[in-house]
Image (cartoon, rainbow, N blue to C red):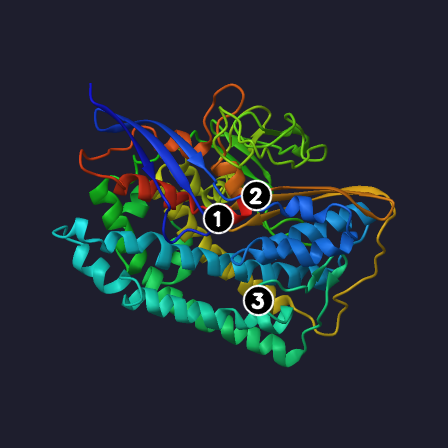
Amino acid sequence: MSERQLLVGPFNRVEGDLEIRLEVADGRVSAAYANSPLFRGFEMMLTGRDPRDALTITPRICGICSISQSAAAALALADASGAEMPEQGALAASLLHGVENLADHVTHFALFFMPDMARPAYAGRPWHARAVAEFTAQQGSVARALVEARARLFHIVGLLGGKWPHTLAIQPAGVTRTPDARDKVRIQTTLRAFRRVLEQQMFGAPLEDFVALETVAALDGWDRGAAGLFLEIAADLGLAAMGRGTGRYLSAGAYPMPEGRATRAGVWDAGEVRPFDPSGVVEDLSHAWMLGGAAHPSQGVTESDEDMRDGAYSWCKAPRLEGRTVEVGALARQVVDGHPLALALAAEAGVRARIAGRLLEIARTQIWLEDWAARLDPSARFMGTWEVPKDGAGVGLVEAARGTLGHWLSIGKGTIAGYQIVAPTTWNFSPRDAGGVPGPVEAALVGAPVGAEETTPLSVQHIVRSFDPCMVCTVH
């Protein structure tokens, strides 16, 4: 039996730093160890500050999902203070957040995942020439069209939030700006233009046609747009069977609205959805360069182990739900929400399923945004009142593009006594726990084929990118 070790990294086209150590036996990964090598310490920075500073500081954790961080911080403060958003404030906040998530999905597909298919290593494949023409970095026709449309989509954030990233528009009691009638028209016009690009470039058909797919067989028959190109590539490379996860999915529910969250919250396991109980979250530190013991985020601390003790190999903590790993992300959201196509893909649980889940969510989110924009009422209130409590605690749970994001806040004597964040990539790229159970990406990499001469295996690249890591959020 031939054995070797590989250190893969740093990964390009990834937000932040990532290294993965592989053990390879007989041409396949036998074990994987994901390392988040850059510690940042935002949780430590927040302690002792005015609680309102969380609204300014946490969005700066990330330049990609800053609105997700802002929304989670606002909800945590609202929970601690008893603040409530007016109906229109919640609607505008969801519009802001939905635009960011939609743009993030498009960016991942066009700039992070599909350019790998234009690599020279795939020359000779029947689809390679088209992948080169459409997704070569800085040159691909589809990539350029989607990126340009994404830039125009962000005009909505400018109208509602003033700027992107790091907008301060979302507050515990609403949003800071009331759009007028002209703003509403501009938002709707921008969304119609973005729909046209999605239908021309991404799907080659009305979005509703893709959303209506219910089976894997129906998905296999989709041959239009860039989505069709991806599915052709996935079939040729065997991406359905590559990078299979455990099949346990978590979602806190996306986009809090007056009538309830836009998508269902829950945990999907073995074909059933059960309620998500945040009290079951524990962060294990056994393989992280952190001091302290396993704890619920409301009781946890962030104290770095500067000696980097033996046995640990990442700055990332290992969150577990009721002692088990879960996968988060677009596929997880759609599975928990019960979309028929996502449920059909849940058993597959590999690279193709994750990317198809994102494509499905792109189409659904665009439709939701159009509905929310139509419901904007410039004559209504968008902001209520709230006061910072002297003492209290709160949790803010949202769905970032990459999955479930939670902020746990405690306030004592008017300042932040504790602040803990569990980000989507913390869930997906966690190290092993005290029982030696690997994190979701580590487990998904086992079995990946590795060529005898490969130092950066394409199979590993595809699996890692299907989770779309954002390492700066992980080691905030």
| Residue drawn at the location 68% of the way across and 48% of the way down | 45
Q: Mark 2 to mark 1: distance in Å?
A: 9 Å
Q: Earlier in the sequence, mark 3 or mark 2?
A: 3
Tag 1: residue type?
Cys
Tag 2: residue type?
Ala
Mark 1 Cα-neighbour bin, 10 Å: few <14, some 14–19, many ≥20: many
Query: Label 2 belongs to which residue?
Result: 423
Q: Earlier in the sequence, mark 2 or mark 1?
A: 2
Q: Helix or strand or loop: what does disc 2 sit on?
A: loop
Q: Nearer the viewer, residue 13 or 444?
A: 13
- Horizontally, residue 30 falls left or right of residue 386, namely left
Q: Are marks 2 and 1 in contact (CB under 8 Å)?
A: yes
- Horizontally, residue 39 falls left or right of residue 468, namely right
Q: Nearer the viewer, residue 165 or 343?
A: 165
| Residue drawn at the location 62% of the way across and 34% of the way down | 276
**Picture quadrant of residue 251:** top right
Q: Nearer the viewer, residue 76 or 378?
A: 76
Q: Earlier in the sequence, mark 1 or mark 3?
A: 3
| Image location of residue 122, percent across then percent down | 18, 50
Tag 3: residue type?
Trp
Q: Mark 3 to mark 2: distance in Å?
A: 20 Å
| Image location of residue 98, percent across then percent down | 55, 58
| Residue drawn at the location 38% of the way across and 69% of the way down | 197
Query: Label 1 belongs to which residue?
Result: 470
Image mark for residue 160: none
**Residue 455 appears anywhere in the view:** yes
Looking at this rendering, what residue extends furthest in the left direction?
A: 124
Q: Helix or strand or loop: what does disc 1 sit on?
A: loop
Query: Label 3 belongs to which residue?
Result: 164
